[in-house]
Image (spheres, grey):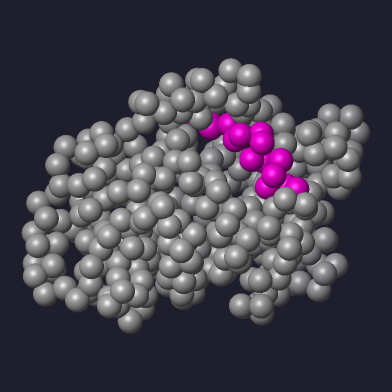
Amino acid sequence: MSIEVVPVTSKKDLKQFIKLPWRIYSGNTKWVPPLLSEQKKMLSRRHCPFYEHSDAELFLAERNGEIVGRITAIKNDNHLMVYNDDVGFFGFFESINEREVAHALFDRASSWIRERGLKYIRGPESYSQNEQAGLLIDAFDQPPVIEMTYNPPYYVDLIESAGFQKKIDLYAYSIEGVTDIPNRLSGAVNKIMKSADFTVRNINMKNLDEEVERVKTVYNAAWSENWGAVPLTENEIDELKKKLKSIVIPDMAFIAEIDGKPVGVSLTIPDVNEALIKLRSGRLLPFGIFKLLWHNRKITGTRTLIMGVLKEHRNKGIDIAFYHETFKNGLKHGFNKGEMSWILENNISMRRALEKIYGTHIYKTYRLYEKEV
């Protein structure tokens, strides 16, 4: 029988949409199952702040009564306000290894986007670059770190055979086996701090709401020049705060200030995926929470999730100071490896600093694709 692509309209449909990855990744030990509670919230029009300003439609691909794929078509009005580029997006894509299934999903998502007056479809982004973005195109033998994507190798063929072409690559850098602060980094930060007009301090968790406002100010300004970046709304910031509050280590979260005003932010978090990968059901209850807490004790990796400096204060070495403090405090907490992700391929200055001063290397590549609808 032919493939039918239908919108998600019921609780049963939504459950099938959320649970499909468990079938796609059955037996894949590198896949990290998402928490079901987080997925439900993210896909809920009532609870996800994305739907306060934009729209999306969830679709399932069915054949012979069996769910064989899924996709979300996305119209991000905040993106359109910034770029006015007639671009819609696709995200939450999963499919069995059949071009026919994937092409049917892309056709349906493209039609939905075209019906809303847009000319291009780009992805994967779920829902924007502020959430998970990019298709993994290499390093499939490595599990993803927290809030990064993972997919089977055959997804590259499914997307490219549907007419999508590369738009831009996102890189993940890695450093492993850390036992001390790199000499080049120590030397560089000592030289910088002798004449620095800035200070670096830890985020004060007791005044978290005020600190989040400082982070938001820098984040939205510093990232505004990044290709494809969209400012976070108040409620999106609040949702991010709720998600990260339980895992943030205060002395690995920093604000750089000049005359008391924030000019840079850095946030490095434990790679909770090291624990979540052991929680194969995606459920915290009734016993998953105990397994999660047990494995949390054994986490050795981190991810630098946010690092940005206001344009007028770049080239002062604020980023180097951030990395130095992150190395120093990370070692105190027993972390010996880290991922810096993601970084745009055209962000040459940050890439050069990571490679020359910190001795890191690209170990994963994520690709955003685009085509006309």
Q: Residue at x 48, y 41 (%)?
A: 246
In terms of depth relative to the viewer, which is nearer, 70 or 243? Answer: 243
Q: Residue at x 27, y 78 (%)?
A: 259
Q: Residue at x 66, y 28 (%)?
A: 22
In terms of depth relative to the viewer, which is nearer, 315 or 59? Answer: 315
Tell me, yes or no, if residue 17 can be seen here: yes
Quadrant of the snapshot with the C terminus: bottom right
322 displayed left or right of 159: left
Q: Is 353 within the magenta?
A: no
Image coordinates of residue 178 in percent, x first then y, are: 20, 39
In terms of depth relative to the viewer, which is nearer, 46 or 158? Answer: 46
Image coordinates of residue 155 in percent, x first then y, are: 61, 43
Q: Residue at x 22, y 35 (%)?
A: 177
Tell me, yes or no, if residue 349 can be seen here: no
- The vertical placement of 334 against 133, above or below, is above
Image coordinates of residue 248 in percent, x first then y, are: 41, 45
Q: Which residues are magenta?
A: 29-44
Task: Tell me which corner region of the image, top left, top right, bottom left or bottom right, holds residue 86.
Answer: bottom right
177 displayed left or right of 82: left
